[in-house]
Image (cartoon, coloured by chain):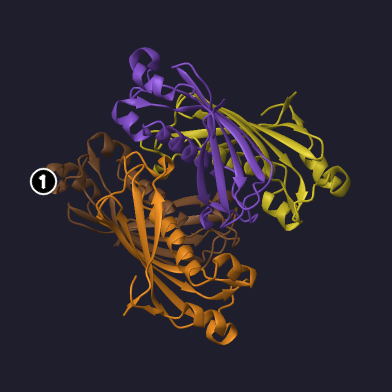
Chain colours: A brown, B purple, C yellow, D orange
Amino acid sequence: MRPYISESTIRVRYQETDQMGVVYHANYLIWFEVGRTDYIRHFGLTYRKLEELGLLLPVVDVQCRFLQPARYDDEILIHTWMEAHNGSKLVFAYEARRKEDQELLTRGSTTHLWTMKTMKRINIRRTHPEIFDRLKHKKVSTC
Amino acid sequence: MRPYISESTIRVRYQETDQMGVVYHANYLIWFEVGRTDYIRHFGLTYRKLEELGLLLPVVDVQCRFLQPARYDDEILIHTWMEAHNGSKLVFAYEARRKEDQELLTRGSTTHLWTMKTMKRINIRRTHPEIFDRLKHKKVSTC
Amino acid sequence: MRPYISESTIRVRYQETDQMGVVYHANYLIWFEVGRTDYIRHFGLTYRKLEELGLLLPVVDVQCRFLQPARYDDEILIHTWMEAHNGSKLVFAYEARRKEDQELLTRGSTTHLWTMKTMKRINIRRTHPEIFDRLKHKKVSTC
Amino acid sequence: MRPYISESTIRVRYQETDQMGVVYHANYLIWFEVGRTDYIRHFGLTYRKLEELGLLLPVVDVQCRFLQPARYDDEILIHTWMEAHNGSKLVFAYEARRKEDQELLTRGSTTHLWTMKTMKRINIRRTHPEIFDRLKHKKVSTC
């Protein structure tokens, strides 16, 4: 039994390269955002809907290791999974791989807090239990 | 008598380069945004305040010519002036120059509409005459 | 008989929005870059290969009209076609539409020059006729 | 005796905000890049010159904590210092503060390796001792 892992495919844009000839490092954080958007969508939710319900999930911590560079026009796979979630705090983990040879490029994690639009912290286990249940550390037999 | 021209100085960030070794073209539009923010500030207003008053100034048209490339760590001057303003529609014009030798790099313009937060168009000559007067095609003897 | 029109699909990233709650205008230029990369790929070429051959295609002019805003998580279709190409100068045209209802959001064009890595201008009709022929204003019966 | 701390001032651009109404988190990494560029400049070097000498300083690790949001048009101070440097690996640390009230917004660090253009790792203590000496964990009595 393993946690659900979502897969997003990204084609590197010219704009995402820098004069070193590789992808500028901060872009991986944007790709991780694409990864967690797709992750949430898998559970029949969208982050857009969560915002319409008045919920926000701001990033409070980022960790990222850069192992190999990505290059223009590469196809990149972003694998995203949930490492922890207690209704108040949520940790996503990510791996970026070059699609062609599955080479691991980057590994990272982001920590988020559930807040209302006012940035007031909440615990969705109490305020929105149905959302907490949906996102609950789901175990699936295959990924 | 010439119109007021504001000057903003920008240092090129590594992130703004691409693998061609020069600044990626879309960044000039971001620098123009810095230019018009500084332009408006000169008149004792800030775009931030305008938004707090419920006003928006979305871009509806962009024109831009790229003559010479900018490079990492170059200092760039953005000169901004108002080409037209009738209270409903506003046109800014821009020149980007390399500070070191004043070489002209890029020339552009952006057209904006005044709207409310709902994106409903308004004419600030009627709704906010005091703002219109402040921004009015001011003639100054020197720039 | 109509020119070939490529179609690229883009999902709006949170990073691409601004505090107006819509996509920041400069991002359309990045999406147009995705559009022309896909356009070129259709002809059995890649822009990456062109660069490996020592060719560059810098942008010298951009025109863009913004009709309707795009929003976070929208799927956007970028339609790209070649308006003109004489071996020295190349003009791409673009339309961005919301996929859901085909609403036209943005219309634009970019003009490019063929150059060598040194930024020296060339005419690929003479220097690389096989590439010129491939990209030649192809007429196809359906798009 | 304290290490040298450089100070860079950044005005938040509209483009750097997202629909949450605050600065999108990945932009802090770009501001940190501005910080270390200014840090290096203080020692009579520029990162641009280092690249002209065939040296690169790619990022291999990023850590960042987000404490308070930055907003459009805020002036932000980036304080940068060197935490460690052995000629092969270099660690920069950063703090971002709102200028107006000195409130701490973000705290981070980036780890870099010295490489040649080929991405081959080097130790500049051996290959470029004069650069190593300049950047050496300088103690200054005031910052």
Residue type, mark 1 in image = Arg
Q: Position of residue B15 (x, y in %)?
A: 51, 55
| Residue A21 visible from this viewpoint | yes
Q: Is residue B100 above or below residue D79?
A: above
- Residue at image mark 1: A126
| In the rendered image, the vertical position of residue B81 relative to residue D98, given as above or below | above
Where residue D18 sits in the image (x, y, percent)? 37, 41
Taking the spot 39% from the left edge, 43% from the top edge, the residue there is C14
Q: Residue visible at 29% across and 26% down? A: B53
Where is the N terminus of chain D found, in terms of image quarters? bottom left
Q: Position of residue C134 (x, y in %)?
A: 79, 42
| Residue B92 x, y percent position in the rendering | 53, 29
Residue that lies at the very extreme toward the front in this rendered image: B141
Left or right position of C28 against A111: right
The residue lying furthest to the bottom in this view is D126
Above or below residue D70? Residue B120 is above
Residue at x 56%, y 82% (from the top left corner): D130
Asked whether, in this view, residue A111 is left or right of residue B45, the answer is left
